[in-house]
Image (cartoon, rainbow, N blue to C red):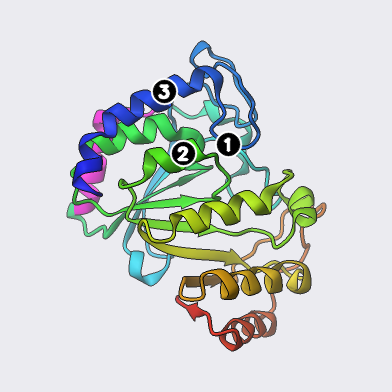
């Protein structure tokens, strides 16, 4: 974390908390008063809730061991989400105890955690609580913002300087697939804008989960955009798609090894920098 920004973390947390009275943290622009208990699309009020914390070794190699802290609530509804229950009923988890979480993070650091990985759900809709948490931590902790990148400018402004690594998801290569699979319109323009804004502010890894059957509509456009706009970005292609039951609009099959290799070959031909 940037030391100067870290000293302002509590001030930023207050700004984020005030914004919850007319919540427009993300492009859904719900405008609800979360401080009064109203809930918008993400299902959250003004409390912050953690449903899991774990030392994880399955992230990109430069991030591990990574201490993952999962926050409830999300502004997308991905059909294949692995933690969908915590997005659909985010208030079912206990409210986070900040003092206890600080102690837990310190313990994980002593156990060898290289990074603190903030994810969910979606960290952006938990902005106020996350900023307060960051204000309580030591500035030298390496913070990963593990995000769907679907958020408004206020989020970008308030996290700038506090984030060491943006682990940025691109989930679809066009808005039509995003509407079907993620339950959102106007997705691609927002995510692309936020990825470009994050570039240069901190380290950034763009992650794309390869969806079976979505080579031409999603994979190829994503790779072409990256090659044209940020060709030196670190790209993580993930092949661990798990089909939901029932599948609905999402692919009903697992990714084949030959399709994974074809995606890698395509990215390499475009000159992209693949990491594992």
For the residue carrying disc 3, how many other residues have a C-alpha within 10 Å: few (<14), some (14-19), or many (20+)? many
Q: Earlier in the sequence, mark 2 or mark 3?
A: 3
Q: Nearer the viewer, residue 170 or 154?
A: 154
Cβ–Cβ under 8 Å for marks 2 and 1 = yes
Q: Position of residue 190 (x, y in %)?
A: 61, 49
Q: CA distance from mark 3 to mark 1?
A: 14 Å
Residue depicted at 70% across the width and 70% down the height: 221
Q: Element under label 3? A: helix
Q: Is residue 266 left or right of residue 14?
A: right
Nearer to us in this view, 205 or 84: 205
How far is mark 2 from mark 3, CA to CA? Answer: 12 Å
192 w.r.t. 272: above or below: above
Return the mark for residue 155.
2
On the image, numbered disc 1 is attached to which residue? Answer: 26
Residue at point 49% right, 44% down?
A: 120
- Segment colored magenta: 95-109
In the image, what residue occupies the spot 55% across and 24% down? 23
SS label for mark 1:
loop
Whether residue 149 is in magenta: the answer is no
- Tag 2's secondary structure? helix
Q: Where is mark 3, residue-wise?
A: 17
């Amino acid at each position: 974390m940037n030391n100067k920004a870290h000293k302002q973390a509590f001030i930023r947390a207050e700004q984020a908390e005030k914004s919850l009275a007319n919540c427009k943290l993300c492009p859904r622009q719900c405008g609800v008063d979360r401080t009064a208990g109203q809930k918008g699309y993400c299902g959250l009020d003004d409390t912050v809730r953690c449903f899991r914390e774990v030392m994880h070794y399955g992230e990109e190699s430069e991030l591990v061991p990574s201490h993952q802290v999962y926050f409830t609530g999300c502004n997308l509804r991905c059909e294949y989400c692995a933690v969908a229950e915590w997005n659909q009923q985010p208030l079912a988890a206990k409210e986070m105890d900040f003092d206890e979480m600080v102690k837990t993070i310190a313990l994980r650091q002593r156990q060898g955690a290289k990074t603190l990985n903030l994810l969910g759900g979606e960290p952006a809709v938990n902005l106020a609580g996350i900023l307060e948490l960051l204000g309580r931590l030591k500035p030298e902790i390496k913070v990963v913002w593990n995000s769907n990148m679907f958020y408004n400018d206020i989020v970008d402004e308030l996290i700038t300087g506090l984030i060491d690594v943006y682990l940025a998801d691109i989930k679809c290569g066009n808005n039509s697939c995003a509407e079907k699979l993620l339950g959102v319109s106007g997705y691609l323009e927002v995510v692309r804008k936020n990825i470009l804004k994050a570039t240069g502010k901190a380290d950034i890894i763009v992650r794309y989960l390869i969806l079976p059957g979505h080579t031409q509509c999603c994979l190829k456009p994503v790779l072409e955009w990256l090659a044209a706009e940020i060709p030196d970005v670190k790209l993580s292609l993930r092949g661990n798609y798990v089909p939901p039951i029932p599948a609905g609009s999402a692919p009903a099959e697992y990714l084949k090894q030959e399709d994974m290799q074809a995606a890698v070959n395509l990215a390499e031909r475009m000159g992209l920098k693949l990491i594992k």
